[in-house]
Image (tube, helix red, strand yellow):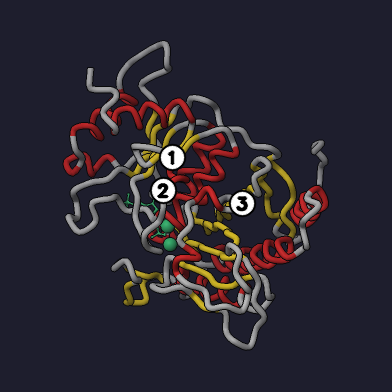
Amino acid sequence: MAKQVGITITEHILRQQRENPRATGAFTTLLNELIVAAKVISREVNKAGLVDILGGTGEVNVQEEQVQKLDVFANRVIFERMCHMGQLCCMGSEEVADLIDIPSQYPKGNYILVFDPLDGSSNIDVNVSIGTIFGIYKRESKDANEEVLLDDVLQPGSKQVAAGYFIYGSSTMMVYTTGDGVHGFTLYPSVGEFLLSHENIRIPERGKIYSVNESYCGYWDEKTKAAIDYFKTKDKKTGRPYTARYVGSLVADFHRNLLKGGIFMYPADLKDPKKPTGKLRLMVEANPLAMVVKQAGGYASDGHGPILDVQPEELHQRVPLFIGSRKDVEVAEAFISGKMGPG
Ligand code: AHG
Ligand code: MN
Ligand code: MN
């Protein structure tokens, strides 16, 4: 598609629909509704410093983490916007323990939406970028009215038909893929439209940035320590040491590395013996970004193989995540899987 200044996200999605002879428009409707939800969340995020919406609700989510009010708000906005338009058979959210059914009064479709309504929630009240992450699957060969089972939803990330994120930063952006490259749109706030600003994003093959919460190094095994040491070791040929950048919102850390090149890591650690697989969630965080990075020419690994090949066992499964520039992630994977050693 030739670059065209001023093209809206709606037009972009419609063009992609026209290029797919089997498209019915259902998917286009779905994405458009999600965009409306994100605009509502964006507006609320922008005024977070102005209204009394900061601080925790005092509740904890299904992962035993403090829930902040904007998480609850974002979750509700997405549910309410997406439940009635007839394209989804169910949803899965980071904030909700079980699958979210479509209320019986509404028609159902064949798509499944999984999402992290607000990622980086610890950054809400300090004005650091946060975001919404989403992945879309198709329910395989079932009647739309048949009850949706967890097994219908537990598909590997490679089955996603679309994925992406919204980032609420110095500007609000949508970055998405339907399997035909990665495209970025920036919200023009006073007009309320997302305009194409980053066409066909490609991540550099090798980056200059490593992003990891190094305060956990005491909880890492030797292979993980060696992987992270690699990026800090001097080597002229590969441009090391890399520079460190980590703000603690996956969306923001990922987005920066996608545009500039680099690797984001959230390895397995022994911090919480109940959660030996790291913190990030396979279905609502790792898989959508893994599809995006792959479409941009990068790679996402759990340390042993592609994230997109992991068969989920549960909705809220956690997974170690190494994601970003292909060569950097391959090196990290080689250390974690024992193919490369220290020295
Ligand atoms: P969420 O706000 O959706 O719970 O996600 C927070 C995640 C992710 O955004 C970030 O990369 C990570 O938590 C940071 O965790 P640490 O504070 O352990 O580094
Ligand atoms: Mn998150
Ligand atoms: Mn979240």
Name the one closer to the observer, 116 or 38: 116
Which residue bears the numbered disc 3?
171
- Which residue type carries mark 1? Pro
Residue 51, visible in the rendered structure:
no
* Disc nearest the viewer among 1 and 3: 1
How many C-alpha atoms fall within 10 Å of the one at disc 2: few (<14), some, or many (≥20)?
some
Q: Which residue is drawn at the image coordinates 50% and 51% (left, top)?
A: 157
* Disc nearest the viewer among 3 and 2: 2
Q: Position of residue 296 (x, y in %)?
A: 59, 36
Residue 198: image quadrant is top right
Disc 3 within 8 angstroms of ligand 1 (CB)? no
Disc 2 to disc 1: CB gap under 8 Å = yes
Q: Position of residue 10 (x, y in %)?
A: 77, 57
The vertical placement of 242 against 180, above or below, is above
Q: Which residue is drawn at the image coordinates 23% and 46% (left, top)?
A: 269
The vertical placement of 9 against 259, above or below, is below
Q: Which residue is drawn at the image coordinates 32% and 77% (left, top)?
A: 58
Mark before the other along the chain sequence, 3 or 2: 3
Please, which residue is most extreme toward the bottom here? 105
Label 2 to label 1: alpha-carbon separation: 7 Å
Label 3 to label 2: alpha-carbon separation: 33 Å
Which residue bears the numbered disc 2?
310
Mark number, residue 237: none
Q: Quadrant of the C terminus?
A: top left
Residue 300: image quadrant is top left
The vertical placement of 308 against 273, above or below, is above
Name the one closer to the observer, 38 or 14: 14
Please, which residue is most extreme toward the top here? 237
Mark number, residue 306: 1
